[in-house]
Amino acid sequence: MSEAAKPAPKAAGRAGRNTELPEHLKSYKGVWVFIEHDRGQVNPVSWELMGEARKLADTLKVDVAGVLLGGPDEPLDAFAKEAYAYGADRCYLMRDPVLKGYRNEPFTKGLTDLVNTHQPEIMLLGASAMGRDLAGSVATTLGTGLTADCTELNIDGRALAATRPTFGGSLLCTIMTLAYRPQMATVRPRVMSLPRRDDSRSGDIVEMPLGMIETDVVTKLLEFIPDASRNTVNLAYADVIVSGGKGLKKAENFQLVWELARVLGAEVGATRAVVQAGWADAERQVGQTGKTVRPKLYIAAGISGAIQHRVGMEGSDVIIAINTDPNAPIFDVAHFGIVGNAMQVLPSLTQAMRTHLDKRIRKTA
Amino acid sequence: MHIVVCIKQVPDSAQIRVHPVTNTIMRQGVPAIVNPYDLFALEEALRLKDRFGGRVTALCMGPPQAEESLRKCVSFGATDAILVTDRAFAGADTLATSYALAAAIRKIGAEQAVDLVFTGKQTIDGDTAQVGPGVAKRLGMNLLTYVSRIDAVDLDTRRLTVERRAEGGVQRLDTTLPALITMLEGTNEMRFASLDDMLRAGRFHVRKWNKEDAGIEDLGKIGLKGSPTIVSKVFGPTPRSEKADMQIVADTSVQDVTINLIQKLFTKHPLLEEQLVERLSA
């Protein structure tokens, strides 16, 4: 009897875990992207993921599919066309009044049913408020592995190798789901670049009913209150960002960051310490626990460059760092560095930029 | 009203250093703290307790020393504290963690029915934001993530109205109890621990539950065994070879440094200058 109780040596993987893909999951094929949309707009992170999905699918020699869930009066067909242009071969659609406006319960049911019916091997979602809410629920329902906030996706053997920062970005780890399908991963906006659009590409649509009615759904969406457009901070997609850290010493000094930002037409970013101190709103936080940004120009003032901040901004095209400590880690990722007091350098830089740009603007006018 | 608040003890990531040669985390001297996002969850739960009466049970899964973090929750005003701790839980990923926490909450609910479960929006060490949704799913509770405000709670009709942060706006959602809420940061301010509560926390008996106490039924669903994800590689970030172009203010006047910087910046990146000028002229 003891013989039977022992696991077969082949099935026992690392630390006695099963790392072999069971027979019934071997037929799972294809790479899916959950296409996130709201009020007539697709979240660009879905197209960024489509580019990654295309690369993974080409390595695996399988198809890419987009998944679109929404109300009957939402432009899902137009979104599907866009999905083909960004690399999808097919779109799975669910149209139902219950799916108008995101809610966890019907979306979890819809996506779970689609997965169980059409069996993809990989499913990617944006690490947004919607994507994270949905991914956690769907992965738990399916009992499969989910890796959050990946910064790199590769194929190792036939499995997804998903790399993500860990311990606040001090280390990177590669995570795999070997014995379960689909392999799920989320990626934050702006981590992957937007693929080139090819409008000559086309694909086919597979529709499936949701099989749920409004009275089945407990949670009701009472209203959607859009952010007043003037106050919206779209840090992730900003072209120029001026960020401040604790090196500015006092809340009042954070004003210097705003002044330079005004001259450059830039957004204002902040470190976690600054947000915790209440000098800036949480939505301005750049870093592992805040936003990932990749502007054309990033100016870091009084920021030492804790790893958790660096992982959120090191993808910027040009980085200027200002810090009193010549050994501050921020200078390891900077292209231009000024060793000096940010309280002194910022006003000077603001003045010099204003003079320089005014001259250039007058020349072009 | 009975509220369970899930918290995690995490290393203060601002103070983590990685050994430059071995690429391992140097944990010595790194203080352990209550995951800062969980404090917004705890405060919100305490406010509901202040309004409606009842109990707040703080729940944590972790090593024995996580007891300190639970004591901290008691000092802020949590009624009860339970630490789920067992070697069998080690190596759990988010799926296995949500299984264990859900089992413990069911067990807590057997003592007194649970109306609400709170978690922070994510942890600062794992950052996944997956455990809250996982626990809700396993308990069949209505899930409300990234909640920025609790508008109304009606214990008679058992209805709950909240505001939830979404992309580009706020959703107002209405649901029924029991529900699981993941609380957004910056939504409230943690109270100061009162002297009475601090004294109480010091001598408080934190209940420690092993896997049997926590009501774990399927041992294949906890710890490393219950975790579908496998960490296949851990490595340090590759340092960039390119060095920054450095200037030191002490060597020359700050005006010279900034003017010099602008010259160098736009000489090397003329396109950036063009884009800036174009945008500012518009």
Image (cartoon, rainbow, N blue to C red):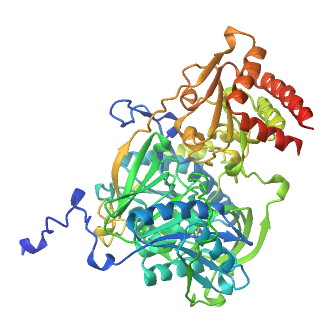
Residue A166 screen position, x and y as percent: 45, 46
**The N terminus of chain A, quarter of image:** bottom left
Relative vertical location of residue A13 with respect to residue A107 in this rendering, above or below = above
* B218 to the left or right of A170: left
Question: Residue at horizontal 64%, vertical 28%?
Answer: A321
Q: From the viewer's side, name the closer residue of B89 and A173.
A: A173
Q: From the viewer's side, name the closer residue of A300 and A133.
A: A300
Choose top left, top right, bottom left or bottom right for residue A226. Answer: bottom right
Choose top left, top right, bottom left or bottom right for residue A25. Answer: bottom left
**The C terminus of chain A, quarter of image:** top right
Question: Residue at horizontal 31%, vertical 59%?
Answer: B224
Residue projecting furthest to the front: A200
* A324 to the left or right of A222: left
Question: Residue at horizontal 67%, vertical 43%?
Answer: A295
Q: From the viewer's side, name the closer residue of B111 and A47.
A: A47
Residue projecting furthest to the top: B251
Total residue callouts? 0
* B100 to the left or right of A114: left
Q: From the viewer's side, name the closer residue of B278 and B129.
A: B278
On the question of residue A7 being in view, the answer is yes
On the question of residue B109 being in view, the answer is no
Residue B4 screen position, x and y as percent: 53, 63
Residue A288 screen position, x and y as percent: 56, 46
